[in-house]
């Protein structure tokens, strides 16, 4: 029983990371109807930036804040420079741009930082917090994820800028007619997604270690989470993330074994696409025409 | 005479390579009401879109003395031009109240925004009842009220309306026209109105233009068009 509870709780810890990345996928999807396949590589690159800052001797949390800020700026720049020109291009061209971005970021990281696997520190290493169920890092990860989710909720729900971003995502023309600079809202969305990805990357790196391909598995779970929750539903993506984390852990421990865990994600993705393309919470908005 | 609030001169505009509007000129006086009438497909919606910079256009457009013909829509709106678009442009997933907040999103005077929100609920009590409801679930009439209220939340100098009576019951149409009259009189908001209901529009407006296949065929004081039997028979059908 204790082992079972442990599997669930540590599933929630990784699930939080999937939830964060799934949420950043959903944010960009809602605004542009594109799935950002490069989201994982952006997160990986951000984690390398953090590693560089820590390696240079900065305290962990300074490096953390610096990485989040820098990733935000890089996300905005990527939207302005790479995505903007293909804004009205056919879907396939956009997908190719995303994949190019993925490959470029991956090789760039390999070229700059080498493909050797590096360790990445966890800031949650205090003594005496050892209870039977969760490691300090897992506990810290859950805390950070919940903070991020709460901050995002408050931002989108209660600030003017958050409202403007939501408005721009759902009705660009009406938004422009209200004076909203829609193009900038999209860029801000990219910045936010990149910042969330950076946090997720820094939280997962102590577990999966740092290398240019570190996000491959994580991204698969995050896609599964986003699809499970409904690709256009932020709340669904978050719930989906936690569910996928727990399912992954339980399946790994009791059903398929750790080696085959990734197939669980694939099975989930295919299952959702076949049986319930709108996801568990995918909503159909009631609209009058 | 003071300079008009909106002055459009030799405006050509259209979609893709073809022009829909050809050399259109008209004005809206400061605090005045101008209506543009015309058959389906005459180019009325196109004209309003061109004024707001939503589509490609050529010619001269001056708003409050500033040239806006090459400005982006967002910047034109920020000068105080609010547009209630064809089809209402509701943010269907936001609540009714959030729709109103979006209308005021460029404003920084929180108190003024809160007061205007109350004023809108005063104009349209139905919106107050439904303010937490998802806007996509409002009735057509309620969404039209919401669209007008959203535009007014900008505190515009010019309110541009594209067929505000479309699909609405006569009683609601009467209410909406009464509110237009009120904001025009009390806040000196200029109005540029496109309407199918020519009779109502000509009663409200001081100036009227008749658009036919992208050209202005006649224009002048609304009373003059109203009283001209031939124009009424030939173009307005009443
Ligand atoms: N998005 C568009 N792309 C291409 N052509 C368009 C577009 N919208 C309108 N048109 C064309 O422009 C012309 C004028 O259309 P517009 O919508 O301005 O007419 P309208 O006077 O508003 O008509 P209605 O009374 O039916 O609303 C029509 O011939 C129409 O086919
Ligand atoms: Mg029209």
Image: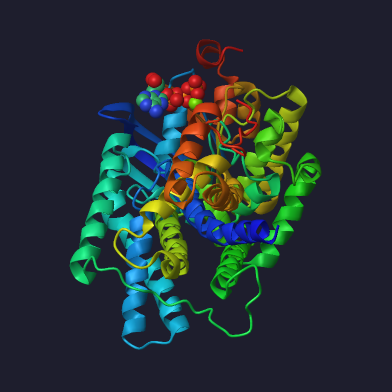
Drawn side of residue A54 relative to residue A227, left or right: left
Given residues A289 and B7, the one toward you in this image is A289
Is residue B22 shown to the viewer in this render? Answer: yes
Asked which quadrant contains residue B43, the reply is top left
Given residues A250 and B88, the one toward you in this image is A250
Is residue A75 shown to the viewer in this render? Answer: no
Given residues B204 and A195, the one toward you in this image is A195
Ligand 1 lies in quarter? top left
Drawn side of residue B11 relative to residue B168, left or right: left
Question: Which quarter of the image is occupied by the C terminus of chain A?
Answer: top right
Given residues B208 and A265, the one toward you in this image is A265
Residue positioned 44% across, 82% down in the render: A60
- What is the x, y in percent for residue B82? 54, 47
Q: How many marks?
A: 0
Residue positioned 57% across, 65% down in the render: A145
Residue positioned 61% across, 57% down in the render: A7
- What is the x, y in percent for residue B4? 47, 48
Q: Is residue A161 above or below residue A285?
A: below
Q: Is residue A203 above or below residue B2?
A: below
Q: Is residue B58 above or below residue A69?
A: above
- What is the x, y in percent for residue A71? 38, 67
Asked which quadrant contains residue B94, the reply is top right
Asked which quadrant contains residue B130, the reply is top right
């Amino acid at each position: 029983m204790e082992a079972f509870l442990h599997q669930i709780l540590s599933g929630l810890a990784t699930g939080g990371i999937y939830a964060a990345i799934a949420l950043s996928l959903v944010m960009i999807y809602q605004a542009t109807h594109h799935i950002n396949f490069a989201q994982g590589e952006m997160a990986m690159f951000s984690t390398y930036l953090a590693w560089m800052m820590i390696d240079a001797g900065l305290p962990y949390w300074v490096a953390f804040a610096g990485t989040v800020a820098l990733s935000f700026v890089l996300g905005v720049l990527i939207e302005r420079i790479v995505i903007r020109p293909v804004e009205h291009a056919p879907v396939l061209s956009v997908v190719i741009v995303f994949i190019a971005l993925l490959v470029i970021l991956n090789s760039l990281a390999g070229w700059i930082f080498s493909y050797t696997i590096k360790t990445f520190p966890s800031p949650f290493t205090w003594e005496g917090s050892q209870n039977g169920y969760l490691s300090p890092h897992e506990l810290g990860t859950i805390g950070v994820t919940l903070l991020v989710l709460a901050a995002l909720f408050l931002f989108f729900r209660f600030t003017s800028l958050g409202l403007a971003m939501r408005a721009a995502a759902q009705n660009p023309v009406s938004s422009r007619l209200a004076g909203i600079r829609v193009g900038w809202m999209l860029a801000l969305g990219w910045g936010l997604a990149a910042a969330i990805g950076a946090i997720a990357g820094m939280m997962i790196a102590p577990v999966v270690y740092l290398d240019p391909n570190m996000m491959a598995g994580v991204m698969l779970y995050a896609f599964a989470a986003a699809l499970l929750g409904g690709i256009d539903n932020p709340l669904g993506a978050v719930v989906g993330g936690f569910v996928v984390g727990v399912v992954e852990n339980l399946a790994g421990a009791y059903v398929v074994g750790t080696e085959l865990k990734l197939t669980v994600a694939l099975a989930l993705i295919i299952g959702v696409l076949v049986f319930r393309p709108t996801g568990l919470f995918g909503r159909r908005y009631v609209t009058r025409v | 005479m003071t300079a008009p609030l909106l002055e459009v001169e030799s405006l050509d505009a259209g979609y893709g390579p073809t022009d829909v509007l050809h050399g259109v000129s008209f004005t809206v006086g400061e605090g005045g009401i101008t209506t543009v009438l015309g058959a389906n497909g005459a180019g009325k919606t196109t004209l309003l879109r061109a004024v707001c910079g939503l589509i490609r256009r050529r010619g001269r457009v001056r708003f409050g003395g500033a040239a806006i013909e090459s400005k982006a829509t967002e910047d034109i709106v920020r000068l105080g031009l609010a547009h209630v678009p064809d089809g209402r442009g509701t943010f269907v997933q936001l609540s009714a109240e959030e729709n109103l907040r979006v209308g005021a999103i460029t404003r920084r005077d929180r108190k003024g925004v809160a007061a205007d929100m109350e004023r809108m609920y005063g104009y349209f009590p139905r919106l107050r009842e439904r303010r937490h409801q998802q806007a996509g679930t409002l009735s057509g009439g309620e969404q039209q009220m919401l669209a007008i209220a959203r535009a007014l939340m900008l505190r515009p100098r010019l309110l541009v309306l594209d067929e505000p009576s479309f699909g609405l019951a006569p009683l609601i149409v009467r209410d909406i026209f009464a509110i237009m009259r009120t904001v025009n009189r009390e806040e000196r908001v200029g109005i540029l109105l496109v309407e199918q209901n020519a009779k109502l529009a000509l009663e409200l407006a001081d100036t009227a233009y008749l658009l036919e296949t992208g050209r202005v065929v006649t224009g002048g004081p609304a009373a003059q068009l109203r009283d001209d039997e031939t124009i009424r028979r030939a173009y307005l059908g009443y």
